[in-house]
Image: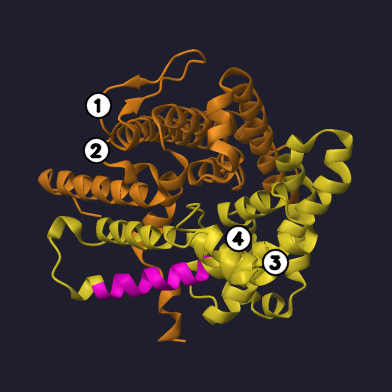
Chain colours: A yellow, B orange
Amino acid sequence: MSYIGIIVNAIFATNALFGYGLEAGFPLARRVGHPLAVALLLALMNAAAAALLWCLRVFLLVPLGFPRLDILFFVIIVLPLLDTLTSLLPAVARKKSCGAKTLVGELNVSSLVFGIALITARSEYGLIEAAVAAGASGLGYIIATVVLDGIRERLELSDTPKAMRGLPSLLLSAGLVSMALMGIDAAFLRGFGG
Amino acid sequence: MSEHGSAFVPQSFLLRFFVVCPLAAAVRSLSEGLAIGLGTALICLVLGLLAPPLRSLVPERLRFFFFLALSSGTTLLYGLALEYSLPAVAAGLGVYLPLLMVNELSLKALRQGTPLPSNTSAEAECSRQSRFAALAIEALMYLAFVIVFGAIRELAGLASLSLPWPDMPRIRLLPVPPLPMLVAPAGGFMLLGGAAALYKVWLRLRGRRSL
């Protein structure tokens, strides 16, 4: 699959939130900066985590015959490296007082970053492809969050039964969006993106 | 920021949504629900038991990574045991098995090991016991919920129930699956929505604050 195909696939067909149910909800729900900056930060962190885990698996764990230990090595090696790398980002260093550092720390251990890193590192992708797919998954997650927030705003204005207000209607809407995204399949994307 | 940042403003039910959404994709059958629930409960209990006594032995700077490594080690051992005993269930869960270590409940247990101890040892011990009891109850409730959730999804989506034994055949209970969509993540979200609505009604009937 071409890079365009990988990106479209990661954003829509296998969306991190609607397809895999992965989340980083708590940190993203805080007001920490412009959404675009948060999206770029998340994409960057996902790409870095996936690339680091891919290198660890391919160059160390698979030759030694212990690919299953990747989750342990993720915690011991990748997480501290990721923590150091992201703390060097100017945006994070500048916004220490606004909780950006906490955001990065919590994102590192969220199921989104860890799950996407595992999925891409364990797939058939090469290093660059894994990093691109992971970065696109981060962007896909942000898009999903924005879509959900738009739905939430509409639902607040509509006349829904009392029992369905709030979380239940949001979950039902997420199910409908997820069903819509099921229509975009990998075969279509192969034809579309090459 | 005010207009564009609305997606990033805390919303109490939006936060709850993010806590439950991994279940929509991970738990598709009774066996998977049991595997996920038992794994989460095991990690919570291990962290709840080991984190408080080990807290003073580990430097504060390394504490979080140490307990996360403990959690990942437990997850790894549980995954290997599951793969040995029930390979089909382990294969079906795939990446969701390692993700148990960053489950919201596991992270909650992990955070219990990281705060500073209380002033007096008696106070610390009392607080430790009550927190462990609360965590154990929460883990058991989570286990019960994921088992029922997985069973309903499997029954409605596949018209059968698969019991978690290696040679146990799938028990067919209905001639045709009534709602095949429930096995997909979309169906999982919808079922969770129905469960949340029922929970809301139940809370209202008991005169308590709603979701």
- Viewer-proximal residue among B142 and A8: A8
Say if B170 sits above or below A152 in the image.
above
- Mark 1 surroundings within 10 Å by alpha-carbon count, few (fewer than 14), some (14 through 19), many (20 or more): few
1 and 4 marks in contact (CB < 8 Å): no
Inter-mark Cα distance, 1 to 3: 44 Å
Q: Amino acid at mark 3?
A: Val
Q: Which mark is residue B48?
A: none
- Quadrant (top left/top right/bottom left/bottom right) for the C terminus of chain B: bottom left
At label 4, the amino acid type is Leu
Q: Secondary structure at mark 2?
A: loop
Pointer 4 or 3: first along the chain: 4
Q: Amino acid at mark 1?
A: Leu
Query: Which residue shows up at 37% across the image and 30% down it?
Result: B147
Q: Nearer the viewer, residue A182 or A57?
A: A182
Tell me the crowding category of disc 3: few under 14, some 14 to 19, or many 20 or more residues within 10 angstroms, Cα based.
Answer: many
Region in magenta: A141-154
- Provide the secondary structure element on which disc 4 rests: helix
Based on the picture, tell me whether residue A151 belongs to the magenta stretch.
yes
- Please state which of the two labelled residues, at mark 1 or mark 3, is closer to the viewer: 1
Could you tell me which chain the residue with mark 2 belongs to? B
Q: Is residue A42 visible?
A: no
Foreground disc of the pair 1, 4: 1
Give the residue pinned by disc 1: B174
Vertical relation: B7 (above or below) A164: below
**Chain of the residue under the numbered disc 4 shown in the image:** A
Could you say where residue A161 lies in the image, as x and y percent from the top left? 12, 61
Quickly name the residue at label 4: A107
Residue located beneath label 3 in the image: A132
Identify the disc placed on residue B178: 2
**CA gap, disc 2 and disc 1:** 8 Å
The reply to the same-chain question for discs 1 and 4 is no
